[in-house]
Amino acid sequence: MNLTIYVDVLFLLNMMVDYIVLSSSAIISGRESIRPRMLAAAAAGALYSVIIFFPQLELLNIIIFKLIASVIILLIAFKFINIYAFIKIFVIYYVINMIYGGGMYAFYHFTSMGSKMNASNGVYYIDLPLWSVILLTFLFYFLIKLFTKITNSRSTKQQIRTLNIYFCKTHVTVNALFDTGNTLYDPISLLPVMLVEANALQGKISETLLREVRAGNTDDLVLMHKLHPDLKLRVVPFKDISGSKSFVYAFKPDKIVDCQKNTEISKMLVGIIATNLSADQSFNALLHSKV
């Protein structure tokens, strides 16, 4: 039996699936999902899925071109941060594709819906009912979101520590999330830097310093030294998750105590940031990955 493939239906269906797979990749990796970029990437993926059916373009179906197409799709969908972040999203994208494809084949195998598996130009195709593909695609997306929400909630709770930070004859208590992505070091002393919200230090350090932090101004280090001579303030280069470079004020505390473990964390600086780290206020500091 010859398989009839409608190009417009194939393109729209693949664009929907690619969009869901890219969105799922963003959810699992924690990457920002920008709708216009995701739609453009999904359209590029759908276009590639269509053109490899043409016999004249059979060469595009070999693995090297598939990998190149995947790289292009991901570069369209997500902003390039560094090679590590790209490899991470690349692996997640392929794993989700395999899970999704395996789920579709399992549905076909156990329900016997659609025609038998066919091949065109070296591409295998299962002619499942359109409603089942759409339903399964959105069910897959819902399960990914649910799974990620549950696992993130559990892992976040397990990784939040209550810390007492002692400095200048006072102390503050913060809820610090252990963050493997925080690799910030002071380039002079080579000490690791944990990050604390400015709001957590309200009433413990001068309003002048807090205003400077919230304004993103780190030009008045001499004045800040005069206001807080015991803090041993310094300015540390800082790069956020988007890749934007700036500076943060950091100080050397007298000690940091982990309340749960009743242990002391030594040789660590505290960087002050204006950003609210948690939408639900479950934590207000980020521990360094070295801890």
Image (cartoon, rainbow, N blue to C red):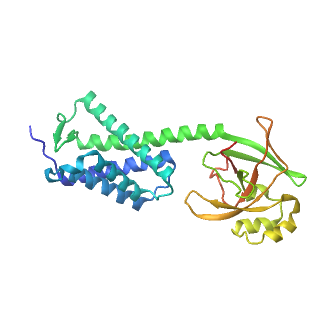
Q: Residue furthest top?
A: 110
Up/down of 280 relative to 203, above or below:
above
User: Which residue appears at 19% of the width and 42% of the height?
Assistant: 122
Up/down of 137 relative to 216, above or below:
above
The quadrant in which residue 206 appears is bottom right
Say which of 241 and 26 sits in front.
241
Q: Position of residue 184 (x, y in %)?
A: 66, 53
Say which of 49 and 225 sits in front.
225
Q: Position of residue 140 (x, y in %)?
A: 39, 40
Say which of 83 and 282 sits in front.
83
Q: Position of residue 46 (x, y in %)?
A: 28, 53
Q: Position of residue 102 (x, y in %)?
A: 33, 35
Q: Residue furthest left?
A: 1
Up/down of 262 relative to 91, above or below:
above
User: Which residue appears at 40% of the width and 54% of the height?
Assistant: 74
Is residue 11 rendered to the left or right of residue 97?
Answer: left
User: Which residue appears at 22% of the width and 40% of the height?
Assistant: 129
